[in-house]
Amino acid sequence: MWICFAFFFEKTAEDTSVYFRDKKIWALGKDYRKHQGKYSVIFLTFKDVKYETWELALDSIDQLMRNEYLRHSEILYGSAMNKYKKQDFEKIVSGSPNEVDLAFSLSKLSQMLDEHYGVAPIIIVDEYDTPIQNGFMQGYYDRVVSFMRNLFSGAFKDNRDLSYGFLTGILRVAKESIFSGLNNLSVNSVLDARYSRYFGFTRDEVSAMLQYYGLEKKLSEVCELYQ
């Protein structure tokens, strides 16, 4: 889902609007269409950061961040970045950052992208809570919470180089602990009906899919499994 979400917003050399013109979002009008393909996007998923020690978890986050920096390597060749920011960029991609460097890496990348394109990026973080849950189970909860607090505070709190930010996870976003520095969050849980028809599948959509595959008789069974 979030890959599609990022694909809608991300600015690329290709005109990606062709993939959305027959979708419902396009029919909603120019207020939605004007955002398509207009932003650089920072996309991270922490779904696989599940390790026995904090050192291994941090190495995994290091690799995720390095890959995302490399995905935006075009900014190195622009004129907006001074030599000090290029050094920060190269430190991340070289595989030699320390914990502090990584904690500031999201906010620094968003600043670099804003300066390069003249439009603040969108940051999407999927399964933000996986390292935290695993840290609790493996005994390094305090270390991972401290790191995540600094990472997200720099990326989302008072970040002038951010157009929109999205976080998803299983744990409810609480405005304390790692989010103690963030007071501008809008929380939408599975109990909120406002967006229920936009995420996942409605009964009508499931029915249409089953009919397409000739399995319409399975509707009650599928609904029972996933209700």
Image (spheres, rainbow, N blue to C red):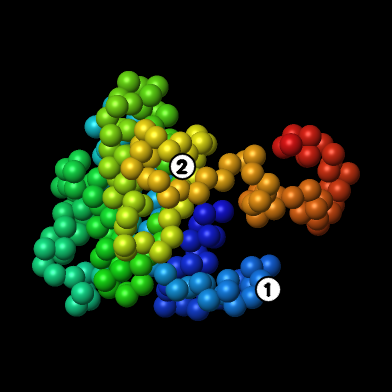
Image quarter of residue 140: top left
What residue is rendered at 28% in x and 34% in y? Answer: 146
The residues bearing labels 1 and 2 have C-alpha atoms spaced at a distance of: 30 Å
Say few, some or many: other residues with alpha carbon within 10 Å of mark 1 (under 14 / 14 to 19 / 20 or more). few
Say which mark, if any, is on residue 146.
Answer: none
Please state which of residues 81 and 153 is positioned toward the viewer in this rendering.
Answer: 153
Where residue 40 sits in the image (x, y, percent)? 39, 67
Closest to the observer: 157 or 16?
157
Q: Position of residue 101 (x, y in %)?
A: 19, 47
Query: Where 14 falls versus 108 (above or below)?
Result: below
Q: Secondary structure at mark 1?
A: helix
* Residue at the image point whose x is 22% and y is 55% from the top: 93
**Which of marks 2 and 1 precedes in the sequence?**
1
User: Can I make out residue 2 in this image?
Assistant: yes
Disc 2 designates what residue? 127
Extreme left residue here? 83
Q: Quadrant of the C terminus?
A: top right
Q: Amino acid at mark 1?
A: Ala
Furthest toward the front, the residue is 183
Q: Using the image as rendered, state which of residue 93 and residue 111 is in the foreground.
A: 111
Q: Which mark is residue 27?
A: 1
| Residue 140 located left or right of residue 82 | right
Q: Tell me if 205 is positioned left or right of 113 in this view.
A: right
Q: Position of residue 58 (x, y in %)?
A: 27, 38
Q: Amino acid at mark 2?
A: Glu
Which one is closest to the eye, mark 1 or mark 2?
1
Q: Is residue 60 visible from the viewing direction of this image?
A: no
Regarding mark 2 in the picture, which secondary structure is present there? loop
Residue located 37% across and 33% down the image: 177
Crowding at label 2, few (<14), some or many (≥20) Cα neighbours within 10 Å?
Answer: some
